[in-house]
Image (cartoon, rainbow, N blue to C red):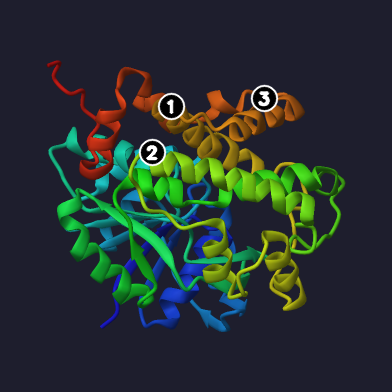
């Protein structure tokens, strides 16, 4: 018998993940915090997935966070990072010890933020953080999603860490044998390559985005953009190495996610384009490539770089350049890191929280 799984979100990833769950014999429920994303489905419309996964389903629809929690044992947060704090705040009062929470994908220590909220109620549940989403795609309408790819490997970890084996079994039951355990939340944060990759792609193609053009993303990872992505990756790997963490390289990421031979990053993206799997780039400057990935991805990498003594200068520059281009202070927009008040804690405190989910100051020696 399949699992009843509640998804917080109603965008391309939530729709695609719901289709995957349905295809595997599970029973998904969708919750749109605004209600708008599931309005047609709530009226009885069928959700259709096309592309890498072809299926139709009638997902259950929740009218509130309370309903989503009450009707499901597994809860998946599947919306952009800038919506995580609002959703976690809404779900936290309704989470019970029977629940298992999955964050797809994990952004800026959101698992720590949720664990702290639950600790205030005296509750502990396993919270599993994915380093990326289980699929990629684009929502075509309120009833259709195009699934571009289903990833063959997704990094994950669970807090508290003693629940890790149980969490891995659950994820495998839901989505198959496609998960790679990593050593704590910092490894997961540094395993999410979307922020750095989207930064390079957006910087190289911002006028295409702003003018609303239709353009191939893979094709436009040209040699110059590809070299920038490779240089950004070296900064991330240096920070991970300083923390003693094992994370995948950008070459492994594209190989495992898009099933192309290992070559230069530009060459791998050209091969994706040739195979019809290069994706379509954002057609607006108001894209999560910037509005999500800069404050909720690049900012955390920059913080970790400073804490480890390995400053991520290209990441830092990207934050400042995008802030200037958009007339916004993207570093100040990260609501989760602001709420956690990381400046109060040491790197050792943060490393403990990456395993326990609880951010506590160590006693002075």
The correct choice, above or below, for 4 with respect to 74 in the image is below
Q: Which mark is residue 328?
A: 3
Name the N-terminal-most of marks 3 and 1.
1
203 or 54: which is nearer to us? 203
Name the N-terminal-most of marks 3 and 2.
2
Q: Is 56 left or right of 284, judged from the image as shown? A: left
Residue 43 visible, this orientation: no
Determine the CA span between mark 3 and mark 2.
Answer: 31 Å
Instruction: Look at the image and tell me in which quarter the N terminus lies.
Output: bottom left
Residue drawn at x 42%, y 54% is: 247
Q: Position of residue 64 (x, y in %)?
A: 39, 51
Residue denoted by label 2: 242
Q: Position of residue 360 (x, y in %)?
A: 21, 27
Residue 362 visible, this orientation: yes
Task: Give SS at disc 3.
Answer: loop
104 or 151: which is nearer to us? 151
Task: Give SS at disc 1.
Answer: loop
Q: Residues within 10 Å of mark 3 (few under 14, many from 20)?
A: few
Residue denoted by label 1: 309
């Amino acid at each position: 018998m399949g699992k009843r799984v509640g998804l917080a979100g109603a965008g391309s990833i939530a729709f695609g993940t719901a289709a995957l769950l349905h295809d595997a014999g599970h029973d998904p429920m969708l919750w749109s915090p605004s209600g708008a994303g599931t309005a047609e489905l709530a009226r009885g419309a069928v959700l259709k997935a096309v592309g890498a996964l072809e299926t139709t389903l009638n997902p259950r629809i929740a009218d509130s966070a309370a309903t989503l929690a009450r009707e499901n044992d597994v809860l998946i947060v599947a919306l952009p990072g800038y919506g995580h704090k609002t959703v976690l705040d809404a779900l936290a009062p309704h989470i019970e010890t029977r629940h298992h929470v999955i964050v797809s994908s994990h952004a800026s220590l959101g698992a720590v933020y949720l664990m702290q909220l639950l600790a205030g109620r005296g509750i502990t549940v396993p919270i599993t953080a994915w380093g990326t989403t289980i699929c990629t795609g684009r929502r075509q309408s309120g009833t259709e999603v195009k699934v571009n790819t289903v990833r063959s490997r997704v990094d994950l970890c669970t807090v508290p860490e003693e629940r890790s084996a149980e969490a891995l079994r659950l994820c495998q039951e839901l989505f198959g044998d496609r998960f790679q355990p990593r050593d704590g939340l910092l490894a997961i944060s540094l395993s999410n390559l979307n922020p750095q990759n989207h930064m390079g792609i957006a910087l190289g193609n911002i006028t295409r985005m702003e003018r609303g053009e239709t353009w191939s993303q893979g094709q436009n990872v040209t040699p110059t953009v590809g070299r920038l992505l490779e240089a950004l990756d070296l900064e991330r790997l240096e920070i991970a190495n300083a923390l003693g963490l094992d994370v995948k390289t950008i070459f492994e990421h594209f190989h495992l996610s898009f099933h192309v031979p290992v070559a230069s990053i530009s060459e791998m993206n050209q091969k994706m384009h040739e195979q019809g799997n290069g994706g379509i780039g954002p057609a607006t400057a108001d894209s999560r490539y910037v509005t999500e990935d800069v404050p909720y991805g690049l900012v955390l990498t920059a913080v970790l770089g400073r804490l480890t003594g390995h400053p991520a200068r290209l990441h830092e520059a990207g934050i400042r350049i995008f802030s200037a281009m958009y007339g916004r202070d993207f570093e100040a927009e990260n609501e989760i890191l602001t709420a956690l008040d990381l400046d109060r804690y040491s790197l050792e405190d943060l490393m403990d929280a990456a395993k326990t989910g609880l951010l506590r100051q160590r006693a002075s020696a």
